[in-house]
């Protein structure tokens, strides 16, 4: 029983954190308020971006998740005063992406299904991040692999959401850069036994943003757009891990090349 409590957080804390974030999503759907448009008019350039209640509530859900994860992790017996910031990254990104996805879903059964799935995803991320505090936990390999897989899936859904919502290029570029950078940074941190690979994460974020910018005006479906961006993210992150583990270059390039070919080939055949 003590072993189980060591590797799993207090159920009441998890429930409170999930409920607060989900309540934010629900209020976003129930409460309607006028938005504000930020404008910047310069010679030859006009910038306009609408700030709505949905934007504010999504950012609030992300902030609540970050602070809530710190509160949740403070009860871990293996933390021993260490910082918890690395365990905020994916939960905060998850809350942000789920907020965007719920905002574009139409009112009705599909929204409620998305709301229920969001609850399951949030709780799963909270549990997995709690487990990964202690690399000696018996469930650590499963938790770290689950976090990596979920982060890739969320990135894929974020790209689809951007494309479906018709987001403008000045929103897509920083959004893709931050999401790809955070996904690669946390995934490499988990796979490389706690090493932070900031140069790789920044480089992968830049490459992903450049590809997104170059393909923005192409006649691609949301799924095609998502697959084309997911392939390089996974391939470059895997390549960074292989190089970090001193795997020979030929072997290191094999898996990323296969994944990239499969993702881009699938995107082509979806036409």
Image: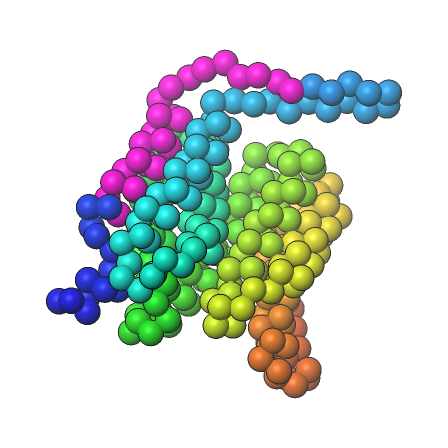
Up-down relation of residue 151 to residue 139 (above or below): above
Q: Residue furthest top?
A: 34
Q: Is residue 266 left or right of residue 109?
A: right
Q: Quadrant of residue 200?
A: bottom right
Which region is colored magenta?
14-38
Instruction: State which quarter of the image contains the N terminus.
Output: bottom left
Q: Position of residue 160 (x, y in %)?
A: 55, 45
Q: Residue furthest front?
A: 81
Chief secondary structure of the magenta span? helix
Q: Is residue 215 left or right of residue 159?
A: right
Q: Residue furthest left?
A: 1
Near-viewer residue (73 or 105): 73
Q: Residue furthest right?
A: 43
Q: Position of residue 153 (x, y in %)?
A: 48, 55
Q: Residue at x 37, y 48 (%)?
A: 70
- Whether residue 250 can be seen here: yes
Q: Residue at x 65, y 85 (%)?
A: 248
Q: Is residue 15 magenta?
A: yes
Near-viewer residue (224 or 43): 43
Q: Residue at x 62, y 18 (%)?
A: 37
Q: Is residue 226 magenta?
A: no
Near-viewer residue (222 or 124): 124
- Whether residue 102 can be seen here: no
Q: Residue at x 58, y 73 (%)?
A: 241
């Amino acid at each position: 029983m003590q072993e189980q409590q060591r590797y799993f957080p207090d159920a009441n804390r998890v429930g409170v954190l999930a409920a607060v974030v989900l309540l934010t999503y629900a209020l976003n759907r129930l409460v309607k308020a006028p938005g504000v448009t930020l404008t910047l008019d310069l010679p030859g350039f006009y910038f306009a971006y609408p700030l709505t209640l949905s934007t504010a509530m999504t950012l609030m859900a992300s902030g609540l998740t970050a602070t809530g994860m710190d509160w949740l992790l403070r009860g871990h017996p293996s933390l021993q005063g260490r910082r918890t910031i690395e365990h905020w990254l994916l939960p905060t990104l998850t809350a942000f992406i789920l907020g965007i996805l719920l905002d574009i879903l139409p009112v009705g059964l599909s929204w409620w299904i998305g709301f229920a799935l969001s609850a399951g995803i949030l709780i799963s991320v909270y549990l997995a991040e709690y487990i990964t505090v202690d690399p000696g936990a018996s469930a650590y390999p499963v938790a770290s692999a689950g976090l990596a897989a979920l982060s890739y899936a969320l990135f894929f859904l974020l790209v689809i959401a951007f494309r479906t919502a018709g987001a403008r290029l000045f929103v897509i570029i920083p959004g893709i850069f931050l999401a790809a950078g955070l996904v690669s940074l946390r995934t490499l941190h988990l796979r490389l036994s706690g090493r932070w690979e900031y140069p790789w994460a920044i480089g992968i974020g830049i490459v992903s943003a450049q590809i997104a910018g170059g393909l923005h005006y192409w006649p691609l479906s949301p799924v095609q757009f998502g697959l084309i961006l997911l392939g390089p993210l996974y391939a470059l992150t895997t390549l960074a891990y292989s190089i970090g583990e001193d795997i020979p270059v030929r072997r290191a390039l094999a898996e990323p090349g296969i994944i990239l070919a499969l993702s881009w080939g699938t995107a082509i055949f979806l036409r």
